[in-house]
Amino acid sequence: MPQPAVELEISDNELRLVYRPRDGTSWVRERFERGDGLLLKGTFHLTPQDLVEDAAEEAASVASDDEIQWVDDDRLVFAVAIADGEYFRFKPEVLGFETPVLLHRDAQPDWKWFSAERKVSILGVIESLGLESIVIGGPNPEAIPIPEYERLLKQFPTPHELRRYVQARVGTVVRQYTEPAIDAEALLNAYVDRRTTAIEPNLEAPFRQFDVAKYALALHRLQAMLANEMGTSEAQWQLEIVEIVEIILLLNPRYIKAFTEVRLLDADASTWRRIDILLVDASGNVDVIEIKRPMGKPIMLPALYRDHHLPMRDLIGAMGQVTHYLRHLNRWGPTGENYLTRLLGSQLPAGFRIRIVNPSGIVIMGRGNTLSDAQRREFEVLRRDSKGVVDILTYDDLLARLQAVLDQLRGGPAVSAAPAVSPTE
C-alpha cells in the first residue's frame, strides 16, 4: 500500500510534517537553494529553516559501520509546530498568518485537519473571522473541542456544494420571472442536509443575564446566521427559526410564548391546516408569524412595472398565506379559543385562556440592504398599506432594531428626565 504524500507525525517536542514528493526530493532542494519556499496543500508555507531531516540522513545517523549505508531518499520532514505546555503551537510563518494556533497534544491529526479541497486552508478561513487565537482541544476555556472540530471538517463546504449554492442564488432571481425545470434551492438543501448535523441552539441561559449581554448575543447570532446561510441545512434552519422567534420575543416583550406547528381548522375546505408559528401575548391574544429563509433575496423586484417596483413573488405568497391563516382564526371564533386553550394550556400559566380577537400577522423574509432609494420607498408604501393586518420585516430590519436597542442600552439608562429648556433657547 503506497504511503501518503503528506502526513503528520508527533514527536516529544514537535509536530512534524512528512512530505514524500512524487518525483523525489531533489526538485524541492533545488527550490530551497534558489531561495524559493514550498507551499503544500495551500496551507503549509515551508522553508529550509523548517527542515528537520530526510530519510537518508536519518538512516545514516543511526546505522552502524556493519550496516548498509543507503536508503531511498523519498521524504522530507519539517517541524511545523513546537511543544508549548499541553499544546503544540504552530509556527506563524508556516501557516502564513500571525494569529496563534494551538493544537492539544492528545489530538491525532492528519493533513485534512488543516486543508480542504482545492487547496483551501481551513485554519486560514477560521483566522479570517478575526479571532485572537485558535485553540483546538484541551482545557483552554476558548478551545474548540476536538469532536466539534472534526464535525466542522466534515461540514466544510465542498466545490460541489459551492456550485449548488451559486445555482440556488441564480435560481432565486430567475424564478421570479419564469419557472425553471430544476429547483436548485431544493437541491442545495438536500445536499447540505446529507452533509450536516443540526445543532440545538441554546439562547435562554445567556438571556437571563444582563440586557446588554442578551441583545449583543442576539445581534451576533443573527449576523452569523445571515453570514452562514450558504452552509445551513434545512434541519439546521428549522432550529435557527427558533432563535429568530426568540429574537422576536425579545424585541416584543408583550409576547410571552410562541408555539410551532399549531393545528388550525380550515372551515372552507373542512380540513386542518398548520400555522408555522403562533404568538401568544400576556393577555392571551394570538398573532401569526411566517419566517422565510433569506437566501440573499431582495424584497422588491429591480424591474419596473408602470414606473413602480413590485414586491417579490415570494413576499406576495407569504403575505397571502398569513392572511388566510388570520381569516381561518377569525372564523373559528370561540370554538377555536376553547380548542387552542385545551391544546396549549399545559404550557401556559394556570388559568390562562387563549383569545382570538382581530389577530395580526408578521412576515419576516428577504434583505433590504441592497434596495435602491426608489425600491425602498415602494417597499415602505407596501409595508404601511398592509400594517395592522400583516407587518413585513426584512432581516436587515431585525439587525437594525437589535443594534438600536443595544446602542441605547450601552448609552445610558432607559428612563431619563427631559431637558428643562430647548437647546435653541
Image (cartoon, grey):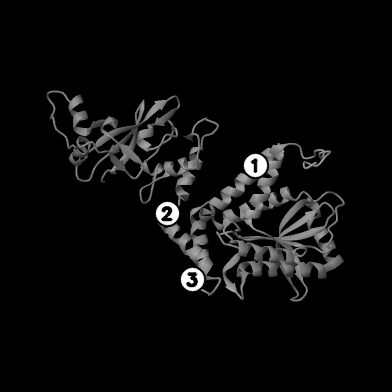
Which of 1/172 is in front?
172
Whole-number angstrom distance, CA of label 2 to CA of label 1: 32 Å
| Residue drawn at the location 80% of the way across and 39% of the way down | 415
Residue 90 position within the rendered picture, expressed as x and y whole percent measured from the top left:
39, 32
Name which residue type carries label 2.
Answer: Thr
Q: Residues within 10 Å of mark 1 (few under 14, many from 20)?
A: some
**Is 25 located above or below residue 105 in the figure?**
below
Whole-number angstrom distance, CA of label 1 to CA of label 3: 40 Å
- Helix, strand or loop for disc 3: loop
Whole-number angstrom distance, CA of label 2 to CA of label 3: 21 Å
The mark lying in front, picked from 2 and 1, is: 1
Residue 299 position within the rendered picture, expressed as x and y whole percent measured from the top left:
61, 63
On the rendered structure, is 33 left or right of 100? Answer: left
Residue 371 position within the rendered picture, expressed as x and y whole percent measured from the top left:
59, 61
- Helix, strand or loop for disc 2: loop
For mark 3, what is the residue? 182
Name which residue type carries label 1.
Answer: Ala
For mark 2, what is the residue? 158
| Residue drawn at the location 17% of the way across and 37% of the way down | 72
The mark lying in front, picked from 1 and 3, is: 1
Which of 154/180 is in front?
180
